[in-house]
Amino acid sequence: MSLGSAAPRRILVTGGAGYVGSVLSRALLACGYHVRVLDSLLYGGEALLGLYAEDRFEFVYGDVRSAAVVGSALDGMEAVVHLAALVGDPVCSLEPALAREVNLDASLQLLELSRRHGVRRFLFASTCSNYGRMADSSSYLTEDSGLRPVSLYAQTKVGFEQALLASGHAGPVAGVLRFATVFGLSPRMRFDLTVNEFALELATRRRLTIYGEQFWRPYIHVRDAAEAIRLALEAPEAAIRGQAFNVGDTSQNYQKGALAELVRAQVGDGCRIERVHKTEDPRDYRVRFDKIADALGFRITRTVEDGVREVLGALSQGVIRDVEHPRYSNEKALRAQAAAAPRPQAPEIAAVP
């Protein structure tokens, strides 16, 4: 495809070696963008190996908390896709101080430095977890629904969302993308995400325990998540500035029990699902996604069934073998690193007025 003359062409992707970022970087390169990835490689850099042959790819190794590193990475960039974060409730609970530094403080610094460097567009990867638990289980949540973060992870996301959307016209055209829970194969594979986890458990262990089968979540394939970001980069400024978008498809809301049965149907007979009754869950949300479809023309191309099929295929064909390795879980990887060596001194976050 050819990029429109108004679309920013030089993109900084923070967290570009991650689960979504490694897919996004490939998608943007395929569409003709110049992509610079900034990543501390907390979970390794193997996901970037296939990109070094691309003339329009650059990599900056560094911590998003470092003003010097971020300033260097921003030179010459026209847009920022901000994915870098400690992702997930378990990881943020494990390292709460680090979660606040990375997810909130460093994000605020990045936004200000982006303004100073003349960045034209700033897209923030947020989460539908910000909705917490819906008051009425028969209804759907929209972008106008109140945010009720119940975890530190969601609190940090909401905190930066509010600052970003309040920036108005003082800086880059800024927008928020609240992603449904992501699934599917990625160069930086994760099995601590619900769909991927259910597929792994039933395929390899033939059993699965689910807690609170009645609770709702929406889901989106990682490739569709990347496509939503591309559309937001190319959309008219007026469609993005100061806007938040739920990213997903209304048809892909599932209760956990129904999701488990969907996976079992593809795995086949001989699987056991144990259901543990749970009346309280910090997250229970069913979401509508009309706004991004109407404003950006976004449509999903892969359903949960498609994602389960591809994960099961990769497992059954031996593409992924060492499924117990900590690299496939953010929490396990962080624990393994902490046990192996002390954490290095954190860079100082600059006081950016």
Image (spheres, helix red, strand yellow):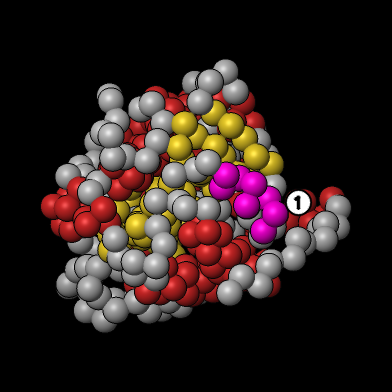
Q: Nearer the viewer, residue 342 or 353?
A: 353
- Tell me if residue 68 is in the magenta stretch: yes
Residue 340 appears at what percent x and percent y?
Answer: 84, 50
Location of residue 167 (image quadrant): bottom left
The quarter of the picture where the C terminus appears is bottom right
Location of residue 146 (image quadrant): bottom left
Q: Amino acid at mark 1?
A: Ala
- Tell me if residue 323 is in the magenta stretch: no
Residue 200 appears in view: no
Q: Residue at x 73, y 56 (%)?
A: 335
Q: Residue at x 62, y 35 (%)?
A: 59
Q: Nearer the viewer, residue 116 or 229?
A: 116
Whether residue 346 is situated above or below residue 25 in the rendered picture: below
Residue 12 appears in view: yes
Q: Seen in the image, is 324 located left or right of residue 248?
A: right
Residue 153 appears at what percent x and percent y?
Answer: 52, 68
Residue lying at the far right in this picture: please name it: 341
Q: Which residues are magenta?
A: 67-75
Whether residue 332 is situated above or below residue 102 in the rendered picture: above
Q: Which residue is mark 1?
A: 336
Residue 39 appears at what percent x and percent y?
Answer: 63, 45
Q: What secondary structure predominates along the stretch shown in magenta? A: helix
Q: Residue at x 25, y 68 (%)?
A: 143
Residue lying at the far bottom in this picture: please name it: 135
Q: Nearer the viewer, residue 26 or 36?
A: 36
